[in-house]
Every structure is written in C-alpha cells, then in structure tokens.
Amino acid sequence: MEERTRAYLRGRFGDFYRRADVTLPPRADDREWGYIPWTSGPDTTMVRHKSTLDLGDHAAFLDRERPRHVYFSAGYYEEPGARTMEEKEWLGSDLVFDLDADHLPNVTLGEDSYAEMLAKCKGALLKLLDFLDRDFGFEDLTVVFSGGRGYHVHVRDADVRDFEREQRREVVDYVRGNGLDLETLVREETVDGIGLKNPTAKRTLPADGGWGRRVTERLGTFADDLLARGEDDAVEFLSEFDGVGEKSARAIYNVVENNTEAVKAGNVDVHPAFLKVARKYVAETVEAENAAIDEPVTTDTNRLIRLPGTLHGGSGLRVQRLDRDELEDFDPLVDAVPETFVGHDISIEPEREYTLEFLGETLTVEPGVVSVPEYAGVFLMARGWAEKAKE
C-alpha cells in the first residue's frame, strides 16, 4: 500500500470516528485492548496489552489514533494492561464464536462472489444460533457482523465465564459434531417383555433435543420420502446406500412401512438392516447441520475480537452489532456501508478488473485510473487491490 493511499484511508477513518457512537462491551475496564494503526511497511503491527486506563476515553482515542482495526479481549483480568498473560491474572472470559466465510465447506473460493460468501456465512450463523439457543439455552448473546468475511457471537452468561479451555473444547466439539456417530448418540433402554427369560435392549435416538432431534427429524423426512416412492423405487434407492443390497433394501422398506411411527420416534432397532440407514443419516446430519466455527477462537480464553461500531481496516465496512430480529433482513453490503463513504466519488487505480456488489448495485471496475463511489474505492484500497490516484 502506497503512503498516499494509507494517508487517505487514515484520514477518512478519522472522519468516520469523529461522528461515530461506539459503545464499549460490558466490563470494559477488566479487558485487554489492542489496535492496529496505519503504519507503513508490508506488515501490520499490533499494539496490544493496553487497558482502558492506557487508552483513555475511547471516543477521544478513536478520534486521535484513527486506527485501522480495534480489538478487545474475551477475557477479564485483574491487570489487563500487564505485558504477560500470567501477570494479567485471568478472572474469566466470554465464550466467543467466529464464523469466517473462507472456512465454510459450501464456499468455493475464486468462484463465489463476496456477496454469495457472506450470504452462506449468514446461513452458518443461523445454524450456530440454533445450537446456542435450543441446545445450550444461553440467554446473553451478542451477534456481530465482523466487517469482513463473517460473524461473531459473544456469549456472556455467567455460567460460561469460568470455563477453562477443556470445557470450551467440549462446546466446540458439540457444535461441530466432532466424534459424533450412532453409537455415541443413541440411548439404550432395557425392555423386559412378558414371557421373555432375558430382558432385551432397545436403542433409541433422543428425539427430544440436541443432535438426536436433528437426526430423528432427518430420518422422519427419509421415511416419508421412502414411502412416497413406492416399494420398487424405494428398493432401487436404498440399494445405492453403502452395504445395502436388494434383500436388505426390501427389508428396510417393509420395516419403515410397518413401523413408520417408531422410525420417526427415533427407534433404530426396528430391524438390523435399518442400522445402516441410521448411521448414514447421523453422518449426513452432522455434515449438513454442524456449525463451521473457527475452533481455536472459541477455545482461547485470551482471544482478542473486533470492537462493534468500529471499522474493519481490510474492507472499510462497519463492525456491526445486530439485534436478533434484524438478522433475516440484514445485508452487510448495504447495512454495514458507512454513511461517511456514501454520496461522492473518488479516483483510484485498481490493479485489475473487479466486480463489486454494494448498496444493491453491481459495479465493474477496470484497471487504470477510474472514478468510483467512495465506499467501493475504500473497499478496494483497504483490501490492497487498488491505490489512491494522484489528484
């Protein structure tokens, strides 16, 4: 990035911060703070191990420093400005989740547009929130658009603050479905039938909640689809499953037809051949419904995370806190575009052709000196894909 470009961005970030109303997170004085300034050179320099006492009034700090990125810690400390983690004396941490479009399995880098990547990331966010709401019952959640490629979720329920890394690892494994299979998921119940010398065991998926509910719902859809196909088509369909031949396929169809409600209730012991179907749908459910979070972020009790209300120095978009009722209609390429950068054009020099989607419009930018809306120019320059043209 040339000095002319850097100076322009720093100046315009300063214009944004002079008008911005940035709210600090709870217990701000107990957190570590860090930021990245608009320094020259190929590498960014993180200034960290700061407390609110070191930075002073946050509005004055933002106006004075005009930082490229601003961060605060998930952790709370006795001495947040100390230089080492041991000296800080950890008091607890928020449980933080990071969803990055670059890491999603359904995103194809180089093919999906930025808008498509962000849309898929919002879908991943909704999956994560389903776990946090329905499975864990967390109540104090803050959802944030990161300003870049995804979303952050901060959980501040009192019960999670003391979680060590091992406990946070368990949460990660759960929402990712790590190590989940039929055997770890089913509940075994002893059935003592009349006239039986020995009681038998019945294995059932816990359909009342959690992963068991998700798998059972998928099995219920499978059962309805199978019966709608009719026997011949169903047998052909089932024969494509690994390890299922025609004889087993016909047995599976018959048992689903005769025990439909039992299948929908999560009973996987309706027939030995049905276990292959159950295992397949456990694996498919995990693949389709797990939350593709950035795992190290959640397990790290000392993680620094972006401050809502500030600007992302790699996009020029606002790091935006979102109410839950805003999520469905939220479009980051419309709603996170700062008003400071709207309403006038600037001249830039892109390094190649780019197609951008902002404020509901598609803009194609050619290499060379071009005039573009400032929000598009700021985005390209912040990305390192363009330089500010000479006046």
Image (cartoon, grey):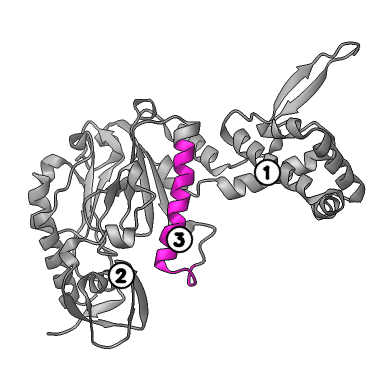
User: Depth check: 225 or 371 in front?
Assistant: 225
Residue 48 visible to the viewer: no
Q: Which is nearer the N-term, disc 1 or disc 3? A: 3
Residue 270's label in the rendered image is none
Q: Which residue is mark 2?
A: 383
Decide: is 128 above or below 364. above
Residue 221's label in the rendered image is 1
Task: Give the distance between the C-alpha atoms of the residues marked 1 and 3, in whole angstroms.
Answer: 31 Å
Q: What kind of residue is marked 2?
A: Arg
Q: Quadrant of the C terminus?
A: bottom left
Please tell me whether mark 1 or mark 2 is closer to you in this view: 1
Mark 1, secondary structure of its residue: helix
User: Which residue is painted at 75% across and 30% down in the image?
Assistant: 262
Q: Which is nearer the N-term, disc 1 or disc 2? A: 1
Q: Quadrant of the N terminus?
A: bottom left
User: Depth check: 353 or 213 in front?
Assistant: 213
Task: Give the distance between the C-alpha atoms of the residues marked 1 and 2, in whole angstroms.
Answer: 44 Å
Q: Which residue is mark 3?
A: 102
User: Which residue is painted at 49% across and 45% down in the image?
Assistant: 127
Q: What kind of residue is marked 3?
A: Asp
User: Which residue is painted at 78% across and 51% down in the image?
Assistant: 229
Within the magenta stretch, is there residue 107? no
Q: Which is nearer the N-term, disc 2 or disc 3? A: 3
Quarter-of-image position of residue 227: top right
Principal secondary structure, stretch drawn in magenta: helix
Decide: is 362 above or below 100. below
Residue 145 visible to the viewer: yes
Chain part drawn in magenta = 109-132
Answer left or right for 391 relative to 163: left
Measured from the top left, where is residue 234 in percent x and y?
Answer: 82, 50
